[in-house]
Amino acid sequence: MGQASFPEMYERWLVGPLFRPWAEVTFEELKLSPGHRVLDIACGTGIVARVARERLGTAGYVVGIDINAEMLAVARTVAPDIDWRLGNAGALPLHDGEQFDVIVCQQGLQFFPDKPAATAEMRRALAQGGRLAVATWRPDEEIPFFRDLRRVAERLLGPIVDLRHSFGNAAPIEALLRDAGFHDVRSRTISRRIRFEDGAPLLRLNTMALVGMSTAGKAMTDNERKRAVEDIVSGSAPVLQSYADGSGVAFELSSNLVTAKG
Ligand SMILES: C[S@@+](CC[C@H](N)C(=O)[O-])C[C@H]1O[C@@H](n2cnc3c(N)ncnc32)[C@H](O)[C@@H]1O
């Protein structure tokens, strides 16, 4: 893991077990048809767009947008045939009049500083009769694996507000979508058992994220932050052990899936 960038590690270690399953669930819900135009907002390294491409083959038009150029660079390497665009969810980089039949925003909305601007942009980008899906993780208090790891980190760092789980209730998401002009807004919680063949990279990346999100971590030098990550990784061993599944680690994970029509 030493020399790889964060986007490379995200793609290598997290996308398969942690993000692909939800992209599959989303497209089970929003069935794609040949010719569909699909937009993946906050695409990261592009798993949602790539699953859409797998399902549509060349009979579709797939665009992925993300604010982070390094995430997009990995997406481009993995799937050069998809139209990857650098841009902000609050001001989507679309061509004049460009619209999509299916829009997905998977684990992105919780990070957007201006959520009403982002949902207004989703509405602008969705063709009449098109369908939208927004997924955000449930609060980590409902996900014992991540809650337990956060508690270990908090012993060293003090209270942590985990941004990844910060928009975990569906009602505010539904309200945002209705306010933006979507109709048929529906939400459900989906839970799945997630399994990692090797829990160590997940633990390290999750710890790096927790340290980075904490007030104490933000005030640290690079070396202090690295030391804190090492200490928390060591202190988390009993948690990892309690979720051991053969040679790997497995746990229940739940996400909101909010769907709407344009
Ligand atoms: C947890 S990742 C999810 C990536 C991808 N959707 C997936 O399922 O793997 C969150 C992504 O949101 C992106 N992001 C955060 N704020 C954004 C914004 N304002 N506009 C566009 N993308 C944003 C980040 O760069 C990151 O790639």
Image (tube, rainbow, N blue to C red):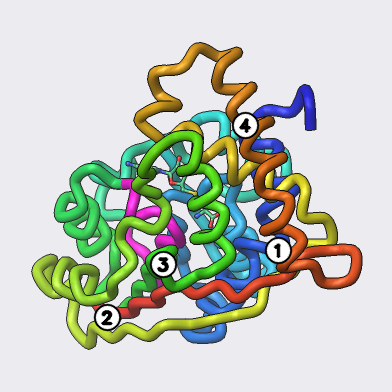
- Residue under pointer 1: 17
- Residue under pointer 3: 141
Q: Tell me the magenta residue range.
A: 99-111
Report the amino acid beneath label 3.
Answer: Glu
Report the amino acid beneath label 4.
Answer: Val
Nearer to us: label 1 or label 3: 3
In three-dimensional space, the C-alpha distance between marks 1 and 3, rounded to whole angstroms, equals 21 Å
Position of residue 182 relative to residue 208, above or below, is below
Q: Quadrant of residue 207?
A: top right
In three-dimensional space, the C-alpha distance between marks 4 and 2, rounded to whole angstroms, equals 43 Å
* Label whose residue precedes the other's in the sequence (4 or 3): 3
In three-dimensional space, the C-alpha distance between marks 2 and 3, rounded to whole angstroms, equals 31 Å
Q: Residue at x 39, y 75 (%)?
A: 256
Residue lying farthest to the right in this orientation = 247
- Residue under pointer 4: 229
Report the amino acid beneath label 2.
Answer: Lys
In three-dimensional space, the C-alpha distance between marks 4 and 3, rounded to whole angstroms, equals 22 Å
Report the amino acid beneath label 1.
Answer: Pro
